[in-house]
Image (spheres, grey):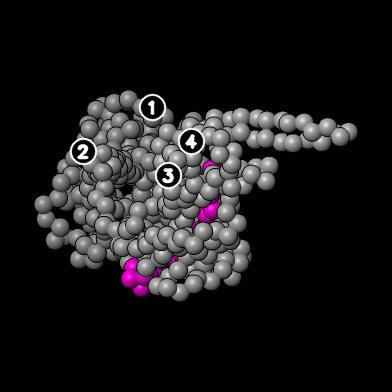
């Protein structure tokens, strides 16, 4: 009974309230009659119920974490979670489902490759604390353009009550990069560009040094088993009478002293290595064929028919037969090249090195590095004795070259 009045469900052991209101406040007494051996016993239990305010609706509908209009992108996957709150007890007749433009979607299969483009998952019932919920997911595998015009409706039906909520999609705006991300990207791009330019610049400036270093480390040898006897044939342009001995000393002393005794090359110098008495034309062709390079020391002071013939023979083998590569050494600046064959202009300019007197004397000077770069790669094998010559060049020719030696006494 409630406040001394019998309650309508007085025969039941439990008293249920479908929806609590303030009017349900009062003192509730449960009275039980027990018969035992002809005697009737009374047992009562009293409970005071206070309802301070009207209770909320039995259930509310909400889409967890979603707004009614959701920004998305074409091709993106979307998952809608529709959750209905049933209040403080589970209503077995409650239902929750999705509609797409008033049409039921297909059911998800659980197999990714067989899933429809849009499908609805199974209904799930959840209890959190003393409240009950039902929830159902709607999956869109890839958002299409036509999905932007659909109404995705979540419908909750319970106790002859229906509630709906509509979800729509719209194309999201392309977000600008955050300022710090843009700034960091620009700084990194500029830094990488600067580093790349610096690396290229350093490599171009010191390309010869890098290649020579690589040859020395790997002990690369381009001369093995190529059938050649000499690394280079030295052609020295001269006349019968020399007003100065500088070019002669360079061709017959300095050049072989450095290349042969310090870098292990084997040179063929006509005045030194060819014994007199042979046929001149045959000797020239033979020694050039046996050489991997043809070193031509250019000088406007000394020109002879034999020197020009050596030059023309070498140019023919370099430009026509492509058997021998030519290295030009400009010993002294030449203002007029008219005395030289026109075919000489067809050679790449990078195959010429310039002798700059005292500046070029040290072994680590740019002149010797460029000359070694143009010569075939060969492991350095220094000699302890000078190359034997049939031309008497004095005692200096037999002394090995060491870095820092001064040629001022020779040149």
Tell me if label 4 and label 1 are in contact, CB under 8 Å: no
Q: CA distance from mark 4 to mark 1?
A: 115 Å
**Residue pointed to by mark 2:** 356
Residue 384: % across, % down: 49, 30
Helix, strand or loop for disc 2: loop
Local packing at callout 2 (Cα closer than 10 Å; few below 14, some 14-19, many 20+) is some
The front one of 319 and 256 is 319
The residue at the point 55 percent across, 58 percent down is: 94
Q: Earlier in the sequence, mark 4 or mark 1?
A: 4
Q: CA distance from mark 3 to mark 2?
A: 102 Å
**Residue pointed to by mark 1:** 402
**Residue pointed to by mark 4:** 25
Helix, strand or loop for disc 1: loop
Local packing at callout 3 (Cα closer than 10 Å; few below 14, some 14-19, many 20+) is few
Helix, strand or loop for disc 3: loop
Residue 281 in view in this figure: no
- Please say whether residue 25 is one of the residues in the magenta stretch: no
**Residue pointed to by mark 3:** 56
Q: Earlier in the sequence, mark 3 or mark 2?
A: 3
Q: CA distance from mark 4 to mark 2?
A: 115 Å
Tell me if label 3 and label 1 are in contact, CB under 8 Å: no
Part of the protein shown in magenta:
128-150
């Amino acid at each position: 009974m409630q406040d001394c009045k019998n309650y309508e469900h007085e025969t039941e052991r439990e008293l249920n309230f479908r929806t609590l209101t303030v009017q349900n406040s009062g003192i509730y007494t449960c009275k039980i009659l027990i018969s035992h051996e002809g005697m009737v016993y009374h047992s009562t239990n009293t409970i005071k119920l206070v309802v301070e305010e009207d209770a909320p609706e039995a259930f509310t509908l909400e889409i967890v974490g979603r707004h009614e209009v959701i920004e998305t992108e074409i091709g993106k996957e979307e998952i809608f979670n529709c959750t209905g709150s049933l209040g403080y007890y589970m209503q077995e007749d409650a239902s929750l489902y999705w509609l797409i433009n008033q049409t039921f979607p297909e059911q998800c299969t659980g197999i990714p490759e067989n899933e429809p483009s849009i499908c609805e998952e199974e209904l799930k019932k959840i209890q959190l604390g003393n409240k009950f919920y039902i929830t159902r997911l709607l999956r869109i595998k890839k958002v299409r353009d036509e999905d932007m015009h659909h109404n995705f409706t979540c419908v909750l039906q319970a106790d002859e009550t229906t509630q709906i909520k509509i979800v729509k999609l719209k194309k999201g705006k392309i977000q600008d990069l955050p300022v710090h991300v843009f700034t960091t990207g620009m700084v990194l791009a500029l830094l990488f560009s600067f580093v790349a330019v610096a690396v290229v610049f350093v490599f171009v400036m010191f390309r010869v040094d890098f290649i020579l270093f690589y040859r020395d480390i790997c002990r690369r040898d381009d001369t093995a088993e190529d059938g050649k006897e000499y690394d280079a044939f030295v052609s020295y342009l001269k006349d019968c009478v020399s007003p100065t001995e500088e070019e002669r000393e360079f061709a017959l002393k300095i050049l072989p002293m450095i290349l042969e005794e310090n870098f292990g090359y084997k040179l063929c110098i006509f005045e030194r290595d060819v014994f007199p008495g042979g046929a001149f034309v045959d000797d020239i062709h033979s020694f050039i064929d046996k050489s991997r390079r043809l070193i031509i020391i250019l000088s406007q002071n000394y020109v002879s028919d034999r020197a020009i013939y050596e030059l023309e023979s070498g140019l023919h083998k370099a430009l026509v037969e492509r058997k021998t590569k030519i290295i030009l050494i400009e010993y002294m600046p030449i203002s007029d090249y008219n005395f030289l064959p026109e075919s000489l202009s067809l050679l790449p300019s990078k195959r010429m090195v310039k002798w700059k007197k005292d500046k070029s004397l040290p072994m680590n000077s740019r002149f010797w590095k460029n000359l070694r770069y143009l010569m075939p790669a060969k492991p350095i094998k220094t000699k302890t004795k000078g190359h034997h010559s049939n031309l008497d060049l004095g005692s200096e020719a037999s002394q090995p070259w060491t870095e820092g030696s001064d040629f001022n006494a020779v040149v």
